[in-house]
Image (cartoon, rainbow, N blue to C red):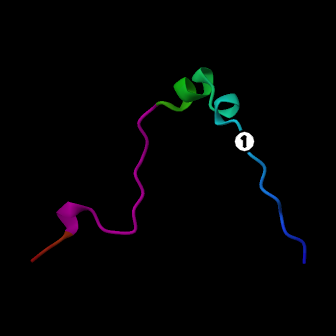
């Protein structure tokens, strides 16, 4: 069995301003719970 060695990553090199702007949009929220209006007492 081999073990992976984690290497440090410069997040600033990955998360560029351009990439953040591209994905800075509202999106659906996923949850395993029903939404608040589905609860009944």
Can you tell which quarter of the image residue 9 is in?
top right
Give the percent coordinates (x, y) of residue 40.
13, 74
User: 12 left or right of 27?
Assistant: right
Furthest-top residue in this view: 18
User: 27 left or right of 35?
Assistant: right
**Residue ID at (65%, 36%):** 11
Above or below, 40 relative to 11: below
**Residue ID at (61%, 21%):** 18
Count residues near mark 1 (Cα–Cα under 10 Å), then give few for <14, some for 14-19, many for 20+: few
**Residue ID at (42%, 57%):** 30
In the picture of the structure, the residue carrying the numbered disc 1 is 9
Can you tell which quarter of the image residue 31 is in?
bottom left
In the image, the segment drawn in magenta is: 25-38
Give the percent coordinates (x, y) of residue 12.
64, 30
Above or below, 31 relative to 8: below
Furthest-left residue in this view: 41
Query: Mark 1 falls on what kind of element?
Result: loop
């Amino acid at each position: 069995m081999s073990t992976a060695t984690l290497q440090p990553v410069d997040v600033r090199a990955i998360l560029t301003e351009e990439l953040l702007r591209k994905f800075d949009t509202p999106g659906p929220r996923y949850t395993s719970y029903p939404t608040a209006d589905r609860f009944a007492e």
